[in-house]
Image: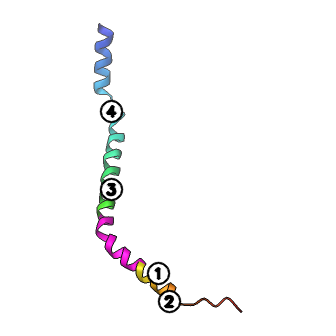
Amino acid sequence: MMNFAKRVRAFRRAEDGAVTVDWVVLTASVIGLVLIAMQGLRGNMTSVGQKAGDFLSSNTINTSF
């Protein structure tokens, strides 16, 4: 029984995983902010892409030199 109590105390004192948890939380929050920003820019990016496509399709490409 004493061995189990020592293991529990050692487990409670260990801080090896604390940095990993910090990085997981930080990464998740950055991904969340990027997704929110992408939702806000979604309509604008579609119109920019449409304008670029219209410009490219309205021009002719000269293939002879």
- Tag 3 and tag 1, C-beta contact below 8 Å: no
Quick check: is 26 in the magenta stretch? no
Secondary structure category for the residue under label 1: helix
> Of residues 9 and 39, which is closer to you in this image?
39
* Amino acid identity at mark 4: Glu
Q: Is residue 24 above or below residue 46?
A: above
Disc 3 designates what residue?
30
Q: Which residue is mark 4?
A: 15
Image point 32% across, 37% down: which residue? 18
Circle 4 Cα neighbour tier, 10 Å, few/some/many (<14 / 14–19 / ≥20): few
**What element does badge 3 sit on?**
helix
Three-letter residue code for mark 2: Ser
Residue type, label 1: Gly
**Is 18 placed left or right of 55 in the picture?**
left
Which contiguous range is marked in magenta? Answer: 37-49
Residue positioned 29% across, 7% down in the render: 1
Q: Residue 52's quadrant in the figure?
A: bottom left
Q: Which residue is more in the foreground, 31 or 19?
A: 31
Tell me the number on the disc at residue 58: 2
| Residue on which the image places disc 1 | 53
Which numbered mark, 3 or 1, is in the foreground of this view? 1
Q: Position of residue 21 (x, y in %)?
A: 33, 41
Residue 31 placement (x, y as % from top left): 34, 55
State which tag comes first along the sequence, 3 or 4: 4
Question: Is 42 in the magenta?
Answer: yes
Task: Return the disc, 4 or 2, that comes first in the chain's sequence.
Answer: 4
Distance between mark 2 and mark 1 Cα atoms: 9 Å
The amino acid beneath tag 3 is Val
